[in-house]
Image: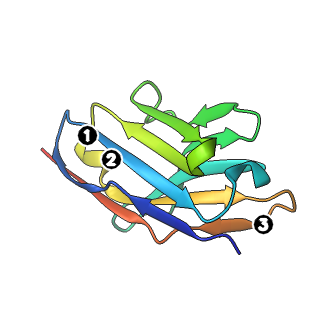
Amino acid sequence: QVQLVESGGGLVQAGGSLRLSCAASESILNFSDMGWYRQGPEKQRELVATMTNGGGTNYAHSVEGRFTISRDNAKNTVYLQMNSLKPEDTAVYYCSLRDWHRKDSWGQGTQVTVSS
């Protein structure tokens, strides 16, 4: 079972930026998909951004143009660059990797709080 550790969350003012990191315990190239999800207060977990093994990306409409998912294969790390943050981006952000059998592994989450 791969272990995922997220970092980079914190408190930021509206309009600011944060970069989240997700370090995996094994090569991320062993996985078909990698992604970031979030769960706001009293909300369901929702997709933020995903990237396929081949590098294709997909974003939620609410973050398109502001957030960028990327990865460093050598460091086994997936990133989420978040710019122009809004109070509605406040949530716990989770990293996920999906293997070729469609089994998902999740990190413990990192809190992002955007103040107005």
- Of residues 55 and 102, the one nearer the viewer is 55
C-alpha separation, residue under disc 1 versus residue under disc 3:
32 Å
Query: Quick check: marks 1 and 3 in contact, CB under 8 Å?
Result: no
C-alpha separation, residue under disc 3 versus residue under disc 2:
27 Å
* Numbered label tally: 3
SS for tag 2?
A: helix
SS for tag 3?
A: loop
In the rendered image, the quadrant that contains the N terminus is bottom right
Q: Please, which residue is most extreme toward the right here?
A: 101
Query: What's the residue type where badge 2 is placed?
Result: Asp
> x, y percentage for residue 34?
65, 49
> x, y percentage for residue 76?
60, 52
For disc 3, the marked residue is: 103
Residue 105 located left or right of residue 90: right
Query: What's the residue type where badge 3 is placed?
Result: Lys
Query: What's the residue type where badge 1 is placed?
Result: Lys
> x, y percentage for residue 30?
78, 54
Disc 1 crowd rating (10 Å Cα; few below 14, some 14-19, many 20+) is: some
Residue drawn 66% across the image and 68% down it: 105
Residue 5 located left or right of residue 100: left
Residue drawn 52% across the image and 54% down it: 37
> x, y percentage for residue 7?
38, 59
The answer to whether 64 is drawn above or below residue 92 in the figure is above
SS for tag 1?
A: loop
Residue 7 located left or right of residue 10: right
C-alpha separation, residue under disc 2 versus residue under disc 1:
5 Å
For disc 2, the marked residue is: 89
Residue 9 in view: yes
- Of residues 86 and 42, the one nearer the viewer is 86
Residue drawn 12% across the image and 44% down it: 116
The answer to whether 40 is drawn above or below residue 16 in the figure is below
